[in-house]
Amino acid sequence: MADMRIAPFIESDPLSPATVLGQQMETTGYLFFRRLIPAEDVIAVRRAVLEHCAAAGWLDPDYDLIDGIAHPDLAPIMEGHPAYMAVYRKVLRTALFHDFPAHPRLMQIAAMLLQGDVLIHPRRIGRMSWPNYTEATTPAHQDHFYIRGSVDTYSCWTPLGACPIKLGGLAVWPGSHTLGYLDHTVKHPGAVGGHGVPTDDAIWHTTDYELGDALFFRSYTIHKALPNLTGNRLRFSTDNRYQLSNDAIDPGALKSHYGLVEQEQ
């Protein structure tokens, strides 16, 4: 991170007219809302996720559950690891987590952006990022590389808890959506996703996220995760996609992430 050029997000007002928010999205490729969702609603989802983590022995019992402190005796794991996927399956089947992208505050923004009947992708996605595992950090990419379907699909990334830069939030390259679709030729073996794009000229926008913050961006907007450098805290987040119900959608987006919900217990 030392060689990254970083600037703060341009904050948006959810009470702005749809035309204003639409113009901001066209210019920067993202909209960032401070404390859009009530803190207690985010904490409820966070607690539900952490209960599954605690049951799996992931958390240090010497700390409060809500702190999300990783057990010091466990090695970090990531998506694809059987122990990770066993917990993740339970998270995806948790009603509070599944229903979160339909929160009225999020739907309000999605409706203003899409100006029509909104479809939330059934493929809800959660991230549980371990400390001291920087090689697994998601590289710079465009969501359209993975989700396909309609280009006019909007992603929303929301941290499930306060997320300072050191914990590894999301960073966006403003205006990068105007580059169009890019070939993802940069390989990142061992990282979540694993395919990326060159970003030598990027100036990244990010922030110390607070409870209830939400970040919407276009499917061509280049973004990446920052590494979790806290040493002992797990980082929890969710990203969800919104599009018009009649637009093209990839069949995979109509199923749960990795098909975990459809699998038998």
Image (cartoon, helix red, strand yellow):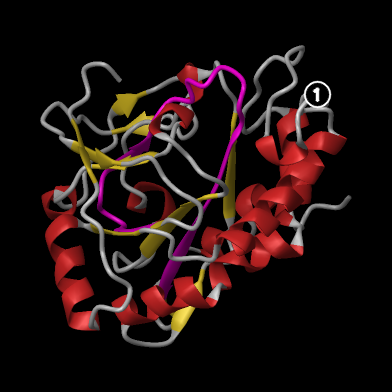
Quarter containing the N terminus: top left
Q: In the image shown, does 87 or 67 lie closer to the viewer?
A: 67
At a point 48% along the width and 53% down the height, the residue shown is 158
Tell me, yes or no, if residue 249 can be seen here: no
**Residue at the image point whose x is 73% and y is 50% from the top:** 47
Choose between 136 and 10: the one closer to the eye: 10
Q: Position of residue 15 (x, y in %)?
A: 30, 78
Instruction: Report x, y in % for residue 154.
Output: 36, 64
Q: Which residues are magenta?
A: 215-243
Hey, what amino acid is under mark 1? Asp
Number of marks in the rendered image:
1
Closest to the observer, 205 or 115: 205
| Residue ID at (51%, 44%) | 162
Q: Is residue 194 above or below residue 40?
A: above
Report whether 2 appears left or right of 107.
left
**Residue 230 is covered by the magenta coloring:** yes
Question: Of helix, strand and loop, which one carries label 1?
Answer: loop
Where does residue 109 sit, x and y in percent of width and height?
37, 74
State the residue at coordinates (16%, 56%). Answer: 28
Q: Is residue 250 above or below residue 246?
A: above
Q: Which of the 4 image quadrants contains residue 27?
A: bottom left
Asked whether residue 253 is drawn in magenta, I would say no
Check disc 1 and report the residue beneath it.
62
